[in-house]
Amino acid sequence: MHLAQLLADLLLSLWRGTIDYTPPDHPSTWEWAVFRDPDLWQCHRQAVVDAAQHLPGSFDRKPCNPAQKINTGYKTWEFQMYIFGLGPALLYNIIPQPYWLNYCQLVHGFHLICQHSMSTQDLQAAHACFIQWELDFKILYYQWRAECFQFIHPCVHQVTHLATETLQKGPPICYSQWMMEHTIGNLRQEIQQPSNPYMNLSREGVRRCQVNALKAMVPGLVEPTQDLPQGSVDLGDGYGLLQKCDPYDIQPQGGAARAIWEYLGANRETEKPAEKVHISRNVKLMLDGEICLTEVLYFTCLAVADGLDEDGEQIFCWQAMALVMMYSCPDRDLLELSIHAMQNPLLMSLAWCPTDPIYHLGVAYEGASEDDKAQDNDD
């Protein structure tokens, strides 16, 4: 079973007070079992549903209501997004702070260890988080009491080996259960004959290893894949500008321009029920050498002046642009308190931003203070 699911099941059973216990110990004496209160559990599970709609479609399945499917239909990916993604924010000021800080240590370690590639510093930091989390977990929950020994599941100790296993095998994400299940599914699709399935499966596995070895030795054998639709523009770094649908250039004015902007930008996803929404317009941009979180409201190609030709005539080129809503920087105190497991940026202002150069063309304020406007006008 997936390690993320095992840890999620352990933590939730502790916080809900449903884990097995040995008298004289009783869940009523556990200060961490906050979700024994049905009203608090009801509010929390609704918060999970409300927050899940802000996860983009590329995150695959979003967490369902934990009270309805936690024991029957909750997928491992939903556990991981719930516990290691949304959890630090949704549980802040819900579970007592010592237990929340211990939980954030585990989350931060997982954030570091689940990267496809990581530095030595990241690996050392993840190992330190896991070691400290296991020690604090035993002090806070187990408390060195014989009647609480059942709290120490094997997965509690297993996380302390993730960093050392990474040194030997590489990042865990590259050999996790998801990768194995995906590979088994691909091999099953390649079996053409129903007879001798195990022999065919082993032969396809050997062939796959041979092909992968050749591609690793000669990268030129790997054919580039085209994931974007025909007519779209590849902007690099995983971004693309889709082809326009109109055969002729038009320039909407007045109310028509406002209506198109609202339809394409702000209101299109709000027309769907919340449980069916996958908000996909939150992106990261590199601005002035820093990674910023933004919400894309509208994107298009604009004609931008690009110098003069030999006759002195102005030359224009098409520039891919996006109107983005800038998020604020995370609260530094809360970020440090949560060991970088929780970020809470807020939407601040609008900005026209080129999708490839690193600079702003201009800022359109909505809800900004007069001091902010005056400061930018002075600049």
Image (cartoon, rainbow, N blue to C red):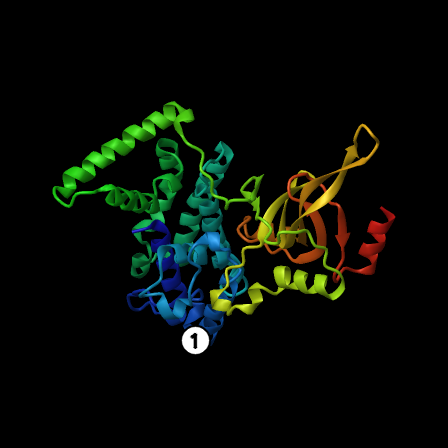
SS category of the residue bearing label 1: helix
Q: Classify mark 1: residues with Cα within 10 Å, few (<14), some (14-19) or many (20+).
A: few
Q: Of residues 138 and 364, which is closer to you in this image?
A: 364
Image location (x, y in percent) of residue 162 = 38, 41
Image location (x, y in percent) of residue 123 = 46, 37
Q: Residue at x 76, y 63 (%)?
A: 254
Image location (x, y in percent) of residue 93 = 54, 64
The answer to whether residue 91 is visible is no
Q: Of residues 263 and 283, which is closer to you in this image?
A: 263
Q: On the image, which quarter does residue 270 sit in?
A: bottom right
Q: Residue at x 82, y 35 (%)?
A: 313
Give the residue at the far bottom of this rendering. 39
Label 1 is placed on what type of residue? Pro
Give the residue at the far top of this rendering. 217
- Going by the image, does 85 lie left or right of 262? left
Q: Residue at x 65, y 50 (%)?
A: 300
Q: Residue at x 84, y 32 (%)?
A: 312
The answer to whether residue 212 is visible is yes
Q: Is residue 309 above or below residue 324?
A: above
Q: Of residues 273 and 226, which is closer to you in this image?
A: 226
**Which residue is the site of mark 1?**
38
Give the residue at the far right of this rendering. 378
Q: Is residue 367 above or below residue 287?
A: below
Total marks in image = 1
